[in-house]
Amino acid sequence: MRFGAHLPLIDFDGSGIPSLTGYVDAAREAGFSAISANDHLVFQRSWLDGIVALSTVVDRSVDLTLATTVALPVVRGPVALAKAAAALDALSGGRFVLGVGPGSSAADYDAAGVPFGERWSRFDEAVRVLRSSLTEERVPTPDRFYDTPALEPRPARPIPIWIGSWGSAAGLRRVARLGDGWLASAYNTTPDQISAGRDILHRVLEPARRDTRAFPIALATMWTYLTDSDAASRTRLDALAHMLGRDPVTLAEQVLIGPAEICAARLARYADAGVDAVFIWPVADPVAQLRHFGTSVVPHLS
């Protein structure tokens, strides 16, 4: 199992966004293999733009993969996102993975002036526009919502496009049809659901003669806070549940908040279910948490 670290784009407690360069240094030193950024225009907390944030740490990332987990092509516009993806891939020397999803927040769509009810039809077309814009291959689109201009410079290699899905059968068929990998949402799934989703995904991929072993499954937005203190665990979990509007009891089984050995055991279940990579997101003390994760969890699962 490989590990990525979400850039700390949220101001959780009003203390501001921590240093991105220091965070990337800590991730690299702790044995992480990737750095990623998520996408929202508006949120319950202050949220730094993910594309801009990734661009500021390209040099600092050295050999780490850079990824969006996920970006919103319907909200941003697929052509503008393709342009940004091509630039990130060029600046990183071909280390970029474009993770995309329709998003689940109507507020983002309202802010962009796009009807939320059109998100699925727009998303399918937007991914085809992304692929056409980023390769020499002309991917047919219905051209209902978007044009596909010839962008330059094009990437020197095909940028992998991973599709976000919570794991419904329809969502996984979309992942197989449009994507090069599946990005699941950590706090919206379980190891058993991932295992069932993997089976669905493979049943769709195999008739198309696509190599299931070369089709990664990753967990994104794995909220994390390693601590042996029950009180600290409850404090962090309650704050996270309040921000997300979730039941803390249910959420406790879907995130990595608590002792390192319990969190490592939970990740081992995901590895057994077929997860290849997990992107963690510390909810506090981000640099210290990355280092703690690197010493207490990564060696047991890498």
Image (cartoon, rainbow, N blue to C red):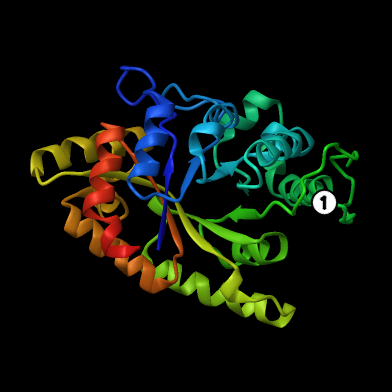
Give me the residue at 26% from left, 63% from top: 300
Position above or below: 49 against 116:
above
Q: Is residue 284 visible?
A: no
User: Looking at the figure, which quarter contains the N terminus?
Assistant: bottom left
> What kind of residue is marked 1?
Thr
Position above or below: 127 against 217:
above
* Residue 243, image x, y percentages: 35, 33
Seen from the viewer's position, the closer of residues 87 and 142 is 87
- Residue that badge 1 annotates: 135
**Lateral position of residue 120 relative to residue 50, left or right:** right
Seen from the viewer's position, the closer of residues 264 and 89 is 89
Q: Secondary structure at mark 1?
A: loop
Number of numbered discs visible in the structure rendering: 1
Give me the residue at 44% from left, 71% from top: 274
Give me the residue at 63% from left, 24% from top: 111
Position above or below: 279 against 176:
above
* Residue 29, image x, y percentages: 35, 43
* Residue 6, image x, y percentages: 44, 40
> Which quarter of the picture shows residue 92?
top right
Q: Is residue 166 visible?
A: yes
Farthest top residue in view: 15
Mark 1 surroundings within 10 Å by alpha-carbon count, few (fewer than 14), some (14 through 19), many (20 or more) = some
